[in-house]
Image (cartoon, rainbow, N blue to C red):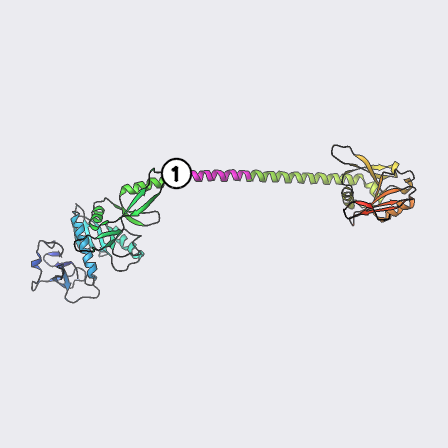
Amino acid sequence: MGYTAVHVGWGRLDASLDDLGCGRSWADVHRVKGLELACPECRGRVFARVSPHRARHFYHQVRPRDCALANESPEHHLLKLELATAARAAGFRAELEVGNEARSWRADVLVFDVQDRPFMALEAQLSPMTPQDARMRTDRYAVDGVAVCWVAMEKRPWERGVPSLRLAPPRNRGDAWTVRYGMARYTWAAPHTVKTKAAWTHISCSLDEAILWILQGRVDAHTGPDGTVWWTARSYVHLAIARARLEADAEAVHQAAATEQRRHAAEQRAAAAEQRRLAAEDRRLAAEQEAQEQRAEQERLTDFFEHAGIKAALWPAFMQLVRSASGKAVTCGDQSPAHGNGLLLYSRQHEASAFQLAGVVCPDPSALARWPADLTILVPGRAWLLRIEEAAQSPLKVAVLNPATKHCAYERVGPRTTTLTRNPSGRLGPQPGA
C-alpha cells in the first residue's frame, strides 16, 4: 500500500493531506465507482481505502511483485507518515513518495523550502541495506541538491556512515517517537585545555524536535574524525574544532621538541662519529709511524741481525717477549764493542725514571771473561745458550727468549749453573733443588 496515487485530471494525490494535495477531498476518491487512479511507481490501478487504524491509503487491486510501494510493510508505511507529520509540524511542505524526473531516486518524504524547492529527503529505511548502498543512494540525492536523513528503528551497519536517526516507537498511546541515536553534543570540561576531558555524546529527543532542528538548519550532519556521521549544532562543531586546534598546537610543540631532540641526538651521533673517525685516523697514523719506526729500527739493526743470526721479521716478537718477561718499558740501544758487539737493552720501572742498562742481546762469547754479574744476557734460542755456556768463565744470567715458539726461560750458567723456571704463581725462580 502507499499514500499517493495519480489521477489523469487532478494530478498527484496524497492521502496524508486533507485536500489530497490537489484541492480534492477524501470523499472524492474513497469508494467512488469508475474512478481511475494509478500507482505513481508501477502505474498499476489503485483504490482508496481506510485501514482499521483509520489510516487513509491507496492499495493495488492485485499486488505486483516488482512495485516497491505495493510491497511496503505496515511499519514502513506508518513511519513514513510520522516523518511527514513531523516535517509539516515544523512548518514545511512535505510530500510523500516523490521521485525526481530521472527516476534515480524516490523519497519517502520530500521536504520543500520557502521557495518551494526540494531540499531534504526523509527516508524510512527498515529493510537491510549495505553501507555502500547507503552512501551511493545519498550521493544520488546530492546530485539534485537534496540532502537526506535515513531513519531506522534498529541498529544498522550503515548508520555511522550517512546522516541518520535511530528511533524508538511510543510505548503507550499518545507518547512521542524518541530519537535514540543520531543526535549528538560535544562536551568539554572547563577550563578548556588539552588535559580536560572532551567527547561527543549522543542525546535523546523526540522525533518532532529532531526533524524541526534538522529542517530549520539548527543542526547539521557532521562527520567526526573517525568517519562517523551524526546531527549536531554548529556551536558544538566550533567547540570541537577549537579543541582540535588546541590539540594540534600542542602536538606541534611536542613534535618541534621531538624534532629538536632528534636533531640534537643526530648532532651528538655525528660528533661521536667524527671523534671515532679522528681516533681511527690517529690510530692509523700511529700505526704508520710505528711501522716506519720499526722499519727504521730494523734498518738500523741490520748489522746486529746478521751478527746474531736473527731474522728481522722475528725481532718484534722477540722484543715483546722481553717486555712481557721483565714487566718494564724496554728500549734498544746500539751494538756495543765493549759488550762483545751485543745489542744493549735499557729498561725503566716508571715513566718518571730514567732508562738504565738492563741487558745485552747476543754478545760475542769471547767477551764474557769480565762480564758484570748483574747484567742479563738475552739470546733467541738454545744454540746461542750453548755458545754462552761454553765460553762462560763466571756466573752468568741468561734469558732464553724464543720468538718463534713464544717460550721463555732463565738460565744461570758458569761455575754455578742454576736453572730458573716459572713457578705456579707465574714468577721466575730457581728449580727446586737447584
Q: Amino acid at mark 1?
A: Asp
Vertical placement of residue 282 versus 225, above or below:
above
Q: Is residue 30 left or right of residue 135?
A: left
Q: Can residue 134 be seen in the rendering of this structure?
A: yes
Q: Residue at x 72, y 39 (%)?
A: 290
Residue at the spot of label 1: 249
262 within the magenta span = yes
Q: Is residue 212 left or right of residue 271?
A: left
Q: Residues within 10 Å of mark 1 (few under 14, many from 20)?
A: few
Q: Residue at x 26, y 50 (%)?
A: 142
Q: Is residue 271 left or right of residue 343?
A: left
From the image, which quarter does the N terminus lie in? Answer: bottom left
Q: Position of residue 235 (x, y in %)?
A: 28, 41
**Closer to us: 44 or 151:** 151
Q: Position of residue 333 (x, y in %)?
A: 81, 36
Q: Residue at x 21, y 59 (%)?
A: 76
Vertical placement of residue 153 versus 310, above or below:
below
Highlighted range, magenta: 246-268
Q: Magenta region's main secondary structure?
A: helix
Residue farthest toward the front in the current orientation of the protein: 433
Q: Is residue 412 left or right of residue 200?
A: right
